[in-house]
Image (spheres, grey):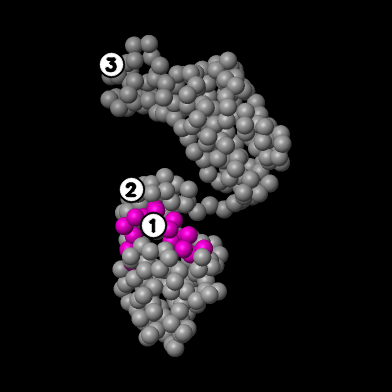
Amino acid sequence: MELLDVARKYFDAWNHRDPAAIASTFAEGGTYSDPATGHSLTKEALESYAQHLFTAFPDLTFEIRSLTAIDAQQVAVQWCMRGTNTGPFAGFSPSGNAVALPGADFLIIENNYVHAVQGYFDQKTLAEQLGLQVNVLPHTLGPFSYGWSVHLPPRVRTQPGALSLTIIQARSAEERETIREYSQRVVREDMMQMPGFLSFMGGWQGLRGFTLSTWENVDKAQQLFRSPVHKEAIDQFFRELSLGAITSVWVPHHVNTIWTRCTSCGQMANAKAPDGMCTCGAPVSENQPHW
């Protein structure tokens, strides 16, 4: 079989969305790597990886733009991967977005089998096409550390009467993911069902995480001590999870007026005005920011 024919057979298997057929084009001990894998995959692991991609992009196809033999063993392939993200991918829910991702593979082929594939594509392009934010930040800069955060705005517009704050230190990236998953479950399965819960913000800088939650009053905040997922997380914390943590509940010394800019007159208006009106007579209730 000609070198280019083996390469075409490999990409035909991808375009038929057949993980077993993809793996069958590889020699024993063959490896696959691309920017998303993080390391070389065996042909067995590649089969699982391909199935994950087909679950995320059920209509995935590769448009071959060029196919060139470099020497007696190497083939260079320029391609464009197309597909619609209707399944979970890399821990994210389906976006419904269509992607058209350009890239290139370099194949080493011997005795009619693929011995290695090294793939290249721009992860930033893929992330942006999926609707994800891509922000390049340093881990630290002088006394500052950088990371990411998530915000769940309040469904009820009212001034908070209590604030719960947790700061926790993970010991590894794996432990950080476990803590993050617990945090998401506590918010989704417990807090969002509780009367008096207002808003949530959480984030990470390296291995240090924080959560900040607002409540109508202290009694509402104490509901967490009776919530199932929170109890499970606390049990894991005292048993084995994290290097340590600080937890606290705060009440406001005072809360100033919540201001919002009136879209009619352009001046700041009291968002909690008893009549819901700006001094110019325009309603302000729909203009409030989601704190």
Quadrant position of the C terminus in the picture: top left
Of callouts 2 and 3, which one flags the residue occurring earlier in the amino acid sequence? 2
Residue 50 highlighted magenta (yes or no):
yes
Residue 196 left/right relative to 205 = left
Position of residue 105 measured from the top left corner of the image (x, y, whole percent)? 42, 72
Q: Disc 2 vs disc 3: which is toward the camera? A: 2
Q: Is residue 219 above or below residue 224?
A: above
> Magenta part of the protein: which range?
45-62
Mark 3 highlights which residue? 281
The residue under the point 51% across, 26% down is: 191
The residue under the point 42% across, 45% down is: 93
Mark 2 highlights which residue? 96
The residue under the point 31% across, 68% down is: 63
Q: Nearer the viewer, residue 172 or 278?
A: 172
Q: Secondary structure at mark 2?
A: loop
Question: What predominant SS class does the magenta segment belong to?
Answer: helix
